[in-house]
Amino acid sequence: MEEGGVAAPRPIRFGTSGWRGVLGDEFTFARARATVRGVGEWLSARAPRARVLVAHDRRFLGERFAEQAAGVLAGCGLRPLRARGAIATPVAAHALRAGRAQAALVFTASHNPPEYQGLKVLGAGGASLSTEETRRIEGLADAALRREVPTAPLRGRPRDLVEPYLEALLACVDARAFRRRRLAVHYDALHGVGAGVLDEALRRLGARVEALRLEADPCFGGAAPDPLPERLLGLRRAVARGHGLRLGLATDGDADRFAALDADGTPLRESDALALLVDHLARSGRLQRGVALSFATGSLVERVARSHGLSVTRHPIGFKYLAARFLAGEADVAGEESGGFAWSRLSFDKDGILAGCLLAELVAASHAPLGARLRELVRRFGPSACGRTALDADARALAALAARLEDPPARVGRSPVRAVSKQDGLHLALDDGFLLLRASGTEPRLRIYAEAPDAAGLSRRLAAGCRLLRDTRGDRAPRARR
């Protein structure tokens, strides 16, 4: 409590990918202005008069949040550059990589449910800010919550950033592969801002595109714009009934995550899709340095990368840790377990649009479906099944996680625990995989990640993880997300 019995404002806290919260509760106009003021003060101390891109996706009130943010930044003496219309986060990240601004503020809650709004802050090269940088912004934002936030008039018209992004994207893709093969791509935009970008890029490359859910809908059809298998039933049916050389692609609400489907409509696990991307880029001579992966990414990617002579580093969950390897010049590619992929040639942040184009290039160049190429990798490097699920972060589950961190189990099922790490939740290394338990950095959920030699073992391992976070025995665990 403050003096006089007045409650102190709730502090602003960034998660693994920016600041997010339920619109009208955690995320309000007053709190957003204070957060932007914190960003503005932090940035103006480092780079006075810096140009700052301000953008938004298709969520509720995104345009109004972006307009107010631009005024707040101008009030800090910075030069806001407004994006024209709703844009994908990868488009904003590329604008920074291309030198159009020194930082960017993107109003997006990515794959979170429709009632959420969020703010992502990007820095050098389009990379997410470090924990140290966001902690500084949090302190400045909390101070700004207690006073009026000044604004200044806006100058200049919003800029089109999509066309420059498309030109740079197409320069990264081998268009000759598409000319040799007539490829059909089924794409589900999930009502997000990948619509009109990924499908347009594929058409320019020469693919036949059948697109679903392109129209804007801030409710995203009544569910989270997360490209999980259960959200892609229409896409799966469309791909399965198609003909010829084909694949399915989907992107999340702000198009920084992707999902891929084989020619029969079967969803690929995210780690398997990353292995295909790394192998394809390395085979075509487009990787020279290393690969940065999260702790929860399956081992197939690492085995593939090392076979091409590439170094591999592992990092906590949160793409900012992977982007730091780009900034250090140590990696060409980064990937994570939830459909995040980046290639430093285009930007330092994850890009579901780029990933989709490269997977389409792979199918066209090899004249084989994704599943066939994946089976080839498994034959060469061994099997791996990696997946994740989640539980509500209620009091019992949080207490159970705290207890497991204090006293880690010696076994997971029949597998003995070979090593324990508490760097990012509770990571249990096993002879044939791992189990990771951690709290989400963007939602009130507890995440369970696991790897096992096959799908049946993965389901058992995820179920074991759920049991470790429950007080009662015998509860049925959620099905694994592939």
Image: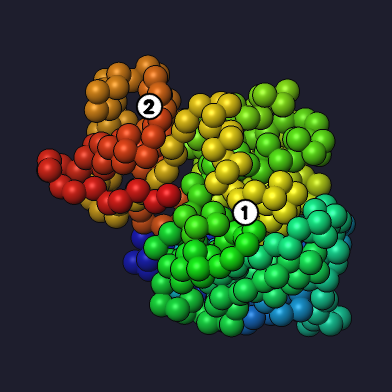
Q: Residue at x 35, y 48 (%)?
A: 480
Drawn side of residue 263 relative to residue 103, left or right: left
| Residue 60 in view of the camera | no
Comparing marks 1 and 2, which lies closer to the viewer?
2
Drawn side of residue 104 relative to residue 436, left or right: right
* Secondary structure under the numbered disc 1 in the rendered image: helix
Q: Residue at x 61, y 74 (%)?
A: 211
**Residue topped by disc 1:** 137
Q: Nearer the viewer, residue 240 or 83?
A: 240
Picture quarter containing residue 279?
top right
**Residue topped by disc 2:** 428
| Residue 350 in view of the camera | yes
Colouring = rainbow
Above-or-below relation of 237 to 363: below
- Residue 43, position as x, y percentages in the image: 75, 56
Above-or-below relation of 344 to 226: above
Q: The N terminus appears in which quarter of the rendering?
A: bottom left
- Residue 401, position as x, y percentages in the image: 29, 39
Q: Residue at x 60, y 59 (%)?
A: 247
- Residue 234, position as x, y percentages in the image: 46, 71
Amino acid under label 1? Ile
Above-or-below relation of 247 to 130: below
- Residue 127, position as x, y percentages in the image: 71, 49
Picture quarter containing residue 98?
bottom right
* Secondary structure under the numbered disc 2 in the rendered image: strand
The Cα atoms of the two marked residues, 1 and 2, are separated by: 33 Å
Q: Residue at x 70, y 50 (%)?
A: 367
Amino acid under label 2? Leu
Q: Nearer the viewer, residue 358 or 322?
A: 358
